[in-house]
Every structure is written in C-alpha cells, then in structure tokens.
Image (spheres, rainbow, N blue to C red):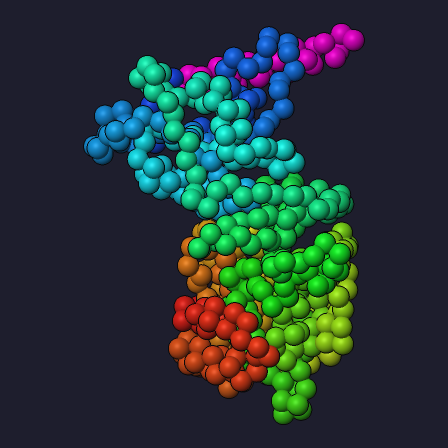
Amino acid sequence: WERRAGQRMAAALHRAERVRKVERALSGVRAGQRVELDLPVDVPGHHGGSLAAPLPARFRASVLDFEGGGGGTKKKPSNPCAVFLVPQGREHEWLFSDREGQVELLAGCGVERLVVVSLLRGQAYGGMEDIQAELNGYVSRLAPSSLPDGFRIPYLTIKEGLGSRTEVGRTRSEMNGTIVVEDVDLEGEGGTSRRYRRMVFLDSSSLIQSEALIRDGAAGQQSEEEIIDHAYLSCRYHHAICAVAALAPRPEGGKERSRCLVVGLGGGGLSVFLSRQLPCDVTTVELDPSVEELARAHFGFREAEQLRSVVGCGLEAVRARADREGGALDLLVVDASGSASESISCPPASFLMDDFLASAAKALREGGIMAVNVVCRSENAFEGACRAISGHFSDVFFARLEDDVNKVVLAFKGGERAGAKAVEVARAAGEALRERQGTKAHRTDLLSCLERLERA
C-alpha cells in the first residue's frame, strides 16, 4: 500500500509541475511560442486535487503565439485568440501537425494566439456545438490573460466540417505494436463526401501506413474486395512508381508480363494496381504477418494469377533472387517503413547499404528498374542515399513530389535508358503508360509526376 501511495504521490507531483509550466507559459503572448498539451490533462484547475487521478485525455492541442508579439516588427493581429478544430482523419497533415504548417495556419487565421485542437482516436464526440461546449472551460484557461472582458473566443474549422472516424479493426503486432483499421469520412471539393479506409500504426506516432478508397454507395453486405476501389492510389509517391513501372522490360519481346518484386505490402493497393493496371506479374514480400492479415481482412487484398504475397524479409528475398536467378527481375519496388527517429525514415537503413544494393542490381535484368520510396526531410541525407544507389546503377533519377516528404528514387540498370536525360525518360514513360495501362485510372496524376523527374 505504501509503495502504491508513493507512486501516486510522485505522479501527482509530476502532473502538478507540468500544469504549472503550462500555466506560466500561456500567461502571456510570447513571440513564436508553441506549447503542446492534452486536454483536460494538462489544463490548470482540472485535477480536482493534488492526488486525484487525471481526467482521461479527450483532445490534443497546440497553442501557438503570433511571431510578431512581444515587441516584434510584424503588425499585431486585431483578434486576440481563436480555436481551430482539425477535421478527424486529417490531423496528420502538414498544415495541422507540423510546426511550420501550424504557423502558416496561425497567420491565415489572423489572431495573436491560436489553439489548434485535434479530436483523439477512440473517443466519442457529438456535433460541432457539443464539442464547443465541452472545450469552452478548457480553452478559457489557455487564452491570454490580456483577453478583454466579455470576449467570446471563436471556433474555426475548414468549410467541409469535422468529418467522422469509425474503427473497423484492431490487432496487436509483435513488430509494429497496436495497429488500427478505421474508416474516415472526408469532405472534398464541391461538398462531396468520400470515405477512406486506413491502416494506422498507433505506436509509431499514429503513422498512416496505408489508405484505400471505399467505393461510393458500397453496401455493408458486400465483401471487402468489392468495397475497396482498387483502381485508386491514395499516395502520390505511388503515382511516380507506377508511371515509371510502364518502362520495365517485358520478357519474350513484350509478350509476357514484367516480373516485379515489391518489398512492403501495407494494404496491398500498390501491388494490386501494378498487377491490374499495368502488365506486371507481382510478388509482394511483407515482413509483418499482422499487416498481411489486415490487408486480406479489411483491404480486399486477394492473390491472383499475376499477384501473390509472401510473409518474409525483403532483404533476404532480394538476395535470394540475385543468387538463384540473377538478372531475371524486371522491376524492384522498395516501399518499406523504417524508424521515424532516423534522418531517413523510409526505407530502413539496411536497404541503402552496399550489400543490398549490389544484390538488387544483380537481381535485375539489363534495363531493369529499382524504385525506392524515400521519406526524408534532410537534403544532405537524401543526397547521400542517391550517391549510395548511384554506386550500383548506371542512371539514377528521382521524382520530387510537391508538398510531400516522400521522394521516389528511380534507378536504371543500363539498357536503352543509359545516359538519358530526365526529360527523355519522362517522355518515354508517358508513351509507355499510354500504350500499356489497362485503363485511364490516375492517368493524369501519373503523367504529372513525370514532369518533376530530375537526375540525381
């Protein structure tokens, strides 16, 4: 009993100190200040007593102060404070999650202090008025002390509204921790609503690992395969991969499909698109069996004559291909998740090591292509990755995607692309795409990615 009491006391003191720090930080507007907190956990006056257990977190908030405050040179906004409610399912977007994005949002709202509030996964919420009523007591304690008497803090959000989120599946992976599958309703242009299915890694900063589009009017009694629109690619970097995949060699003078190996399954959307929309015979290797199970159960992934999936290590799969049948692969796609703590979070560092890259080059036939999804905010780290790949491939290009941390590195093993300029590769890929793609699904998106192709 004494040990538990001591633990409760220590936890209570830690909470109290945290709340005091928040209270001091937010007492006045400080130029460029950003404070992150959970509501009501970190709000002063909402603990009921020093030893009381904290109320469960209902919201996550970032409090930002105008950069020109406190004697800055920028013109002071006329409005002192506002709350911005982030639509459910969009809290991961740059504008709402990144410091620079939130600063841009603050400037757009034209206030001295902006409280950016996200609704937490797994919680039940009412409508806009219900959420506002629940937040009012917390927000009043986050407003500047200089707030004029009687000022009513306005609540803002995007014109399409707050959206909705429904959990449809959950599992515990030994490799990736808790994984949730959820359906998210988002409003698009013209007021039309679209529903997306997502696979989210909760233990990796709620990383959205995969996303698929649910067909309009999909009935509840339909199978998962019928519900999911497999002609839709949710990720922009998938557009670049698929656009250049049209250039992959085809055995027997083009009579057979390109032999493709994809490292990383996710929900299976990329592999299905390659096998159905392009002349590719696809084998996918997924390290986490829980991910493959979720892809089959909730994302409509089904094996077919030109599509199969195996659970295993992608590194070992590529090495085995190189040793067993070197030069038989036409297209290698590396779309594997790494660690968010690294300068390059995708792919894992082992996929950029010389021994793997040598195996990758050996596994590909002359003219074969390796496409690598690289997630990196450091230009120096990205340039280092390109140099490593260039040591094993004759020609290396990359597609820089606008407003996206993903870059797709495209490495060619000799062939007719040797020495080609980026514009020549883009033109050839566009022509091959028009000739080989089964339908026009994402045709405009795929072609637009080629316009941003650069030589590494």
Q: Main secondary structure of the magenta part?
A: helix
Residue most toward the bottom?
Answer: 253
Q: Where is residue 435 in the image (x, y as percent from the top left)?
A: 53, 85
Residue 20 covered by magenta stretch: yes
Magenta stretch: give its range.
1-26
Is residue 324 on the magenta stretch? no
| Residue 176 in sight in this render | no
The x, y position of residue 46, in whole percent, is 55, 15
Tell me which residue sits at (64%, 48%) in the image.
Answer: 183
Q: From the top left corner, tell me how far across and down residue 440 is, in percent.
A: 53, 75
On the picture, is 114 further left or further right than 434? left
Q: In this view, does 89 lie above or below 238?
A: above
Residue visible at 64% across and 9% down?
Answer: 51
Q: In this view, does 316 lie above or below 63?
A: below
Q: Which quadrant of the figure contains the C terminus?
A: bottom left
Q: In this view, does 238 lie to the left or right of 314?
A: left
The one nearer the camera, 397 or 297, is 297
Report the number of numbered marks. Answer: 0
Name the residue located 53 percent from the left edge and 24 percent from the top edge: 134
Viewer-side residue, 34 vs 228: 228
Percent x, y of residue 234: 56, 59
- Please identify the quarter of the rendering in which residue 250 is found: bottom right
Q: Nearer the viewer, residue 96 or 389?
A: 96
The answer to whether 190 appears left or right of 233 in the picture is: left
Q: In which quarter of the image is the N terminus?
A: top right
Res 27 seen here: yes
**Which residue lies at the image location 59% right of the left edge and 53% below the top edge?**
195
Q: Is residue 5 above or below residue 432?
A: above
